[in-house]
Image (cartoon, grey):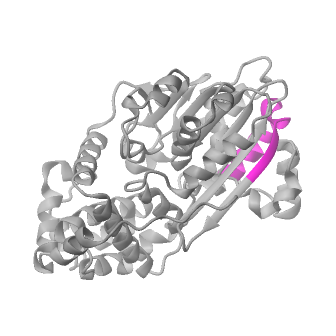
Amino acid sequence: MNILDYLDWRGDLSFAAAEIGEVDALIFAWLSYYRFEELGEAAFDGLTLAELAALHERKLGPIQKLNPKTTIEPSVTAAWLLRSAASTPRFSSVRARDFKRAADAERGIQFAAVSFLIDGGPRVVAFRGTDNTLAGWKEDCYLAFSEAVPAQKLAERYLEGTADGREALVCGHSKGGNLAMYAALHASDARLADVRRVYNFDGPGFNFDLQKSERYNRVRERVDTIVPESSVVGMLLNHEEDYRIVRSQMAGILQHDAMFWQVLGPRFVYADKRNASSVYLDRTLRGWIDGMSFEERKEFVDAVFSVLESTGATLTSELPEKIAQTGVKNLLSADTLNPEQKRMVLRLLLNLLKAGNANLYDSMLRSELAGEIAKGLADGTSYLSGAIDRGLDALTERLGSGRGARERAKSAGPESLPEPEEP
């Protein structure tokens, strides 16, 4: 049972009859992925979800039913979720308000937020997570070396600007979860007094220790952080330890897609602990990132995205095929990454490729280029034994020491991020 099944089970009850809960919060968080901008910002403000779904079908055509095994693009699944929610008494009268968006690929900015007004209930402030653009993912990676990325400052401003005397529930998935947390942590005292709950669904952490933050300790009782068993995104950087672990119908990195999280009644189905691969990757990434200066992190992120952009991909959905065609070759020839960095990037690329297209993944592993890796990859968790590292060592052994990049990183000064513009 997932959130679509939940709508079938719970959708006949109004929010007055059954108070908003954690699964409802995820539905609102996921609806923020809907491409409101395609309707024109002024065209839908104040419309109910039922009216919004009808407007979509008039302007953009019928919303196609999903094949959940092949459709994993959040904006597409959000459209079907909108249609499903709009057909229920529980969600049909909820109004969408105050959609704001900022996007700048050159400056690595991707932000969107929308509010949902429940009759007689709270305002739900939902922050969109990372979309399917490389610019969005690049901004995510800037979290590794920045005290605040532009989207976080925009989220703070958005939450403050939605104060209307109502209680507020703040939520988001992936980067949207991070934005929800950041906005709540930086809200004025007056605005924070209205915030009833903050839901962070598998969002990455911060560059400061939340446990030592006086502000976090004031709001921690109102925070719900929920991650899947194989969480990778939600374990990045410093995060709150009081998280809960939800079971998913998917495996590996695809567990990040919350459309597949398991639901039983009004709650998620929880596990006792994360799986071993998630814990291992968390420790590996954390130890690796912690050992780098902010300047080294920035140079690394810029170099990685230079490799990704050199494939010709602009959307993450294009990456599996592009990686198989040119991505690994471009990575191995990149002189801005040292062998250790190339090993880490190649591991992440292989995980992304396997999640996106298993056939391309298998084909690439059997190729002459990656034959060394194929010997050490029996399954998706083989890197736990160190076999993948031996394969990556063999691939990168001939690539030189890579000292130039590290020396340049040490000598370069930090580059400031652009100031956020009004969304």
Left or right of residue 5, residue 278 in this image: left
376 lies above or below 77: below
Name the quarter where the N terminus is drawn. Answer: top right
Give the residue displayed 80% in from the left and 19% down from the top. 16
**Residue 263: x, y in percent?**
56, 29
Along the line of sight, the residue nearer the viewer: 370 or 234: 234
In the orientation shown, which residue stands out farthest toward the top?
Answer: 17
Relative side of 43 to 410, left or right: right
Q: Position of residue 182 (x, y in %)?
A: 53, 41
Quarter where residue 81 is shown: top right
Residue under the image location 13 percent in, 53 percent down: 386
- Is 110 within the magenta? no
Q: Quadrant of the C terminus?
A: bottom right
Q: Is residue 419 left or right of residue 195?
A: left
Please tell me whether residue 86 belongs to the stretch shown in magenta. Answer: yes
Query: Residue 388 versus residue 417: which sits nearer the camera?
Result: 417
Name the one closer to the observer, 49 or 283: 283
Residue 350 can be seen, yes or no: no
Q: Residue at the location (66% across, 25% down)?
A: 193
Residue nearest the observer in this picture, 52 or 111: 111
Q: Which residues are magenta?
A: 78-99
Measured from the top left, where is residue 422 in percent x and y?
69, 59
Q: Where, by quadrant of the figure, is residue 356 drawn?
A: bottom left
Q: Which quarter of the figure has residue 85?
A: top right
Relative height, residue 368 to residue 53 (above, below): below
- As drawn, is 37 to the left or to the right of 204? right
What x and y, as percent, mark residue 11? Answer: 75, 29
Q: Is residue 239 visible?
A: yes
**Mark count:** 0
